[in-house]
Structures are given as structure tokens and as C-alpha cells.
Image (cartoon, grey):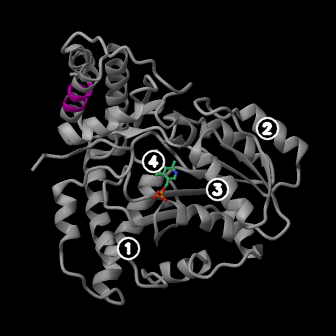
Amino acid sequence: MTKHYLLTPGPVPVPPEIALKEALPVFHHRTGEFAAVYRDIAKGLKYIFQTENEVYALASSGTGAMEATVANLLSPGDRIIVASCGIFGCRWIEIAQEYGMEVVSVSVEWGKAVKPAEIEKALRENPDVKAVYTTFVETSTGVANDIKTIGEIVSKTNAVLVVDAISGLVGQEFRADEWKVDATVSASQKGFMLAPGLAFIMLSGKAWKLVENSKLPKFYFDVRKYKKFYALSETPFTPPITLIVALQESIRLIREKGLENIWNECGLLAKAARSGMKALGLELFGEVPCEVVTSALVPVEIGVEIVETLREKYGVSIAGGQGDLKGKIIRFAHMGYIGKADLLVGFTCLEMVLIELGMKIEKGKAAAAVEKVLLKAM
Ligand SMILES: *Cc1c(COP(=O)(O)O)cnc(C)c1O
């Protein structure tokens, strides 16, 4: 049996405090017991999203909440802008097109950050668009987008700003209200440190105006149902009770540490990870590196093998590239329950694998580089 290290950008490892809650017996959800938990998580989610808006929990992975923002905000014939810079940005286009929406795409090459000025120009040229859809942390490339500036631009128009913050939330500074974000989605298996299966959706007053006029078909993900039941501290359908109980513990742990401290720590780990990659002779990938996952280019001949060997020989899981980036990059996550010691383990094993696969690296270089950054900050 090999000890396993999960260093992927979702799912991330579940801390024992949360895992124990996930193991508790299930109780009924139309009870005062559940309502008390629900009230508590409702308050906690506002803190985590940095919002006064209501945040609903949905039983789905993150993509379900993404789809819900399309089905609930738009109507047949609507036009939207999608500003994408990777796989998850492209997912907005796929979902919107499936619903028959007309998409004005403001996309940039993968590895670059979306350009706020291009969004501004697209809004000027298409004054009828209902919404701008974009991604906070584009997990497939490791790039963070400037949501604050984009929020400033979109808030001056009639369009709403919809942001996929699935991987960035909790780990990297995100302020829904201050940054004028109208709809945000996230999911349980990233910064929240929970098992997958729970998604979140936040909607502003401006977004609710669209909801009230939306004519796209929806049933399970109809947010009006969630709003009605939210007032009763309930959900319209059977919730993933176990995950909601575990979420209460996740929020407790996040509050105990404090969001700003978590942001700072992820920032430090990101700095150490970038330094570790460079020490291994790997070029960093991504124009504006985010703080929850670090990407680097790897020789294509061994790109896939690095990830497989690391998992098979050492029990260390990192992520490779997706889509067109398959085999070309590796992605090392440092969000959620991934800490300083995990970084040292991960980088040391990564170094051993690269040496085994023929790269010329002086032993101990990656760990030394990671240590240097960590020690300086202590
Ligand atoms: C993980 C992730 C998703 C996908 O979420 P699922 O939970 O797999 O549906 C979407 N967007 C981003 C930015 C992600 O990191």
C-alpha cells in the first residue's frame, strides 16, 4: 500500500476533521436539525464569497452551477460575451451554444489572461448583450484573470458579469460585491476541501432581474425554487446532506484560519512552487500565474509519462495538460488542504522522476529552491 498525495487542482485532499463529518449517519432534511446547519452555511458562504447576496448550494459538480447561470439568466435569442483563455472558459461557450445562445467570443490564446479592454470594446460594439461570462482562475492553464477591472467595466453597462470562481475561490483573493460580480459559481472539491458533489451559485440583484424575465427551460436548476426554500432554510430537493454537514466544518476551518491568511499562504506556496519549477529547469506557463495552481512547460516526449510515473512510483498525483495542452504542461496544485510539507514532498518526487526520465538535474535543487522561499517567509 502506497501513501497517496493528492496535489491536483481538484479534487484536493479532504482534511480529517471534514472526512469525519462525511462519515456521520444521514439524518432527515425537513427538520430543525438540518435548518440549523443550513442557516449556518448560508452565513458562511456569504463570508467566503464576500457578498451580501444569497448563495445557494446545488447537488452537482461545478459545471451544473455553470449551466444554471445560463439557463436562469438568459432567454431564446439572447446574445452574450464570453471572455475565455482556456478549457473552462470554452465550457461557457459550449453550454451557451447548447442552449442556442449567440456568443460573441473574446478569447485569447491559452496561457494568456483575458483582456479587459477587449471586453470593453465588445460591449461597446454589442450594446444588446445580456451578460459577460468569464473565468477567475483558469485552472487548465494556471492563469488568473483581473475580475476587479472587468467588474468595473461591465457594471457601467446593462449586462451582468458571470464569473466561474470554481477553483479560485477560498485560495485567492476574491470579493464578489466589491468587484461588482453579478453571478459567481464554485464547487466543493477545490478550495472548500470537500469531496466532489456540491456546487454553489450566487446571484446579485441585477442578475435576479434577468432571472425574472428568463425564458430558457429549466427545472432542477431553477434558482427561483432554491430562493423560495432558502427562506425556510431548506432546499427544494433532497440535498447532499452529508456534504452540507461537511461544508459546515469546512466553513468553520476556513473562518478559524481567516480568508486573508489563506490567501497569503496560497500566495506563498505559489511563489515557492514557481521557484521549484524554475530550479528543475522548467519554464513557467501562463502570463499571469494564479495562486492556487502552478503550471510549467515540460518536454513533450515525457509530458504524459511524468504524471503517470509520479503517481505510480511515488503515490504523488499532479495534473498534466488538458486538451491541446496534453503532454505539454504539468500542473501542481497548492490550494485547500495542501501545505508547505506537501510542496516539499511533491517537488522532491517530481525531481526524482525527471532525473529517472533522463533530465539532467542536480539532486536536491527543487527542494532547496522551495525551502529558500518558505524559510524567508517564516
Ligand atoms: C474544476 C473546474 C471546473 C469544473 O468543475 P466540475 O466540478 O468538474 O464540474 C470548472 N471551472 C473551473 C475553473 C474549474 O477549476
Residue 352 visible to an observer of this rendering: yes
Judge the density around disc 2: few (<14), some (14-19), many (≥20) Cα neighbours within 10 Å: some
The residue at which mark 4 appears reads as 167
Image position of 129 with respect to 118: above or below? below
In the rendered structure, find residue 120 and report the number of the disc placed on it: 2
The stretch of residues the image draws in magenta is 345-350
Q: Are marks 3 and 1 in contact (CB under 8 Å)?
A: no
Say which quarter of the image contains residue 358.
top left
Residue at the image position 75 percent from the left and 40 percent from the top? 106
Q: Which one is in front, 73 or 10?
A: 10
Is-magenta flag for residue 284?
no
Q: Nearer the viewer, mark 3 or mark 1?
A: 3
CA–CA distance in space, label 4 to label 2? 25 Å
Q: Amino acid at mark 4?
A: Ser
Q: Nearer the viewer, mark 2 or mark 3?
A: 2
Residue at 85%, 66% (x, y): give it: 77
Q: CA distance from mark 4 to mark 3?
A: 18 Å
